[in-house]
Amino acid sequence: MKVSRSGMSSLAKKFALGIDIGGTKLRVGLVSEELELVDLLITKEHRILNPESLINMVADCISQLIDRHQGIELIGAGVGYPGPINFPDGSTFSYCNLLSSEWNSIALREMIKCKIGLPTLLDNDANLAGLAEMRLGSGQNLSNVVYLTISTGIGGAIFIDRKIYRGFLGSAGEFGHMVIDIHGGECKCGNKGCFMSQASGLGLEKIIKESSSCSFLFSNQEDNDDYVKKLLDLAISGHPSALEIIQPLADQISAAFLNILHILNPEAIIVGGSLGKVFLHLFSPSINQYLKSHLPKELIDQTRILEAKLGDVNGILGGAILVFDDLERR
């Protein structure tokens, strides 16, 4: 999506901040009331930080945006967090895709609100990405949808009659922690064989470290290279060894889709995330064949697997939508 810079010409408009605390990148964006992304800052340095340091980084990004667009009216911030949250009280659960051990039961919404001095709303990052896809992307004409993001981790969002279903506390849609192999590797949540531990960027990192074939593929590479990207680039180009290494992921993704379709019967599964797009490109024929073989004809004929349209800014746009929707309800 094109990022424009409206500057001083938009002083009469209201703006919201969308803050996407991703598993790999921190994105802070300025969004107009027309849901146009006006400006954007991205950093990769946040993942190792503790809550206080990360919030300071967010506040610094916001200050930079305000300096670049002086005089605008900011009405609030919508924050996406890479893990389950207690939505009613704005606190974190005991695990997430950040590396610091200090994120257990943090009152994150209140901490950010106090730091930046703006009304602040907190939600799971996949919920916000899915919300943007429902309003502006692949889900615009749909009512009952599952949004699934596959990137550093795996998350999801459930939409029933176009409204987010968050569950009792707010942690519904954590499809990454759906167990698809009871003998699989250990996940950050403490269980074994979670979808995320198998088919996410984190799972691929583990596969690369443990695979002798990967050692051969990357024997001449630098230690700081992005091995996950290199492996997927090789697979896309048709490299036999790379395809053999990642082929088991097709079965795991197919099984996850099957579970989602049986349990929730959505009109569509919208797949986002940097790895989600690649996996659809590589595995769509085998996924479709698997689903056709394991689902009633009536169900598979009327259910679509769609690619997300908004790319890596959907979390920012979803955060802003959360803020503008809250303003309308006041």
Image (tube, rainbow, N blue to C red):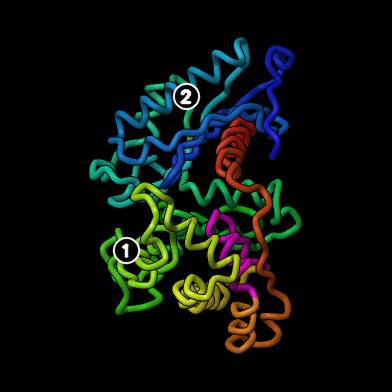
Question: Badge 1 local density, few (<14 within 10 Å), some, or many (20+)?
Answer: few
User: Which dot marks residue 144?
Assistant: none
| Mark 2 lies on residue | 61
Q: Is residue 158 left or right of residue 46?
A: right
Instruction: Determine which quarter of the picture holds residue 323.
Output: top right
Residue placed most toward the observer, 197 or 132: 197
**Residue shown at the point (48%, 17%) measured from the top left:** 63
Question: Badge 2 local density, few (<14 within 10 Å), some, or many (20+)?
Answer: many
Q: Secondary structure at mark 1?
A: helix
Magenta-highlighted residues: 268-284
- Residue 112 x/y as whole percent: 39, 28
**Residue shown at the point (53%, 50%) measured from the top left:** 127
Instruction: Say if the magenta span includes residue 190.
Output: no
Q: Is residue 275 left or right of residue 298?
A: left
| Total numbered labels | 2
Q: Is residue 164 left or right of residue 140?
A: left
Q: Is residue 263 visible?
A: no
Residue 163 in the image: above or below residue 257: above
Instruction: Say if the magenta span includes residue 269.
Output: yes
Main SS category, magenta section: helix
Decide which of tag 1 and tag 2 comes sooner along the chain.
Answer: 2
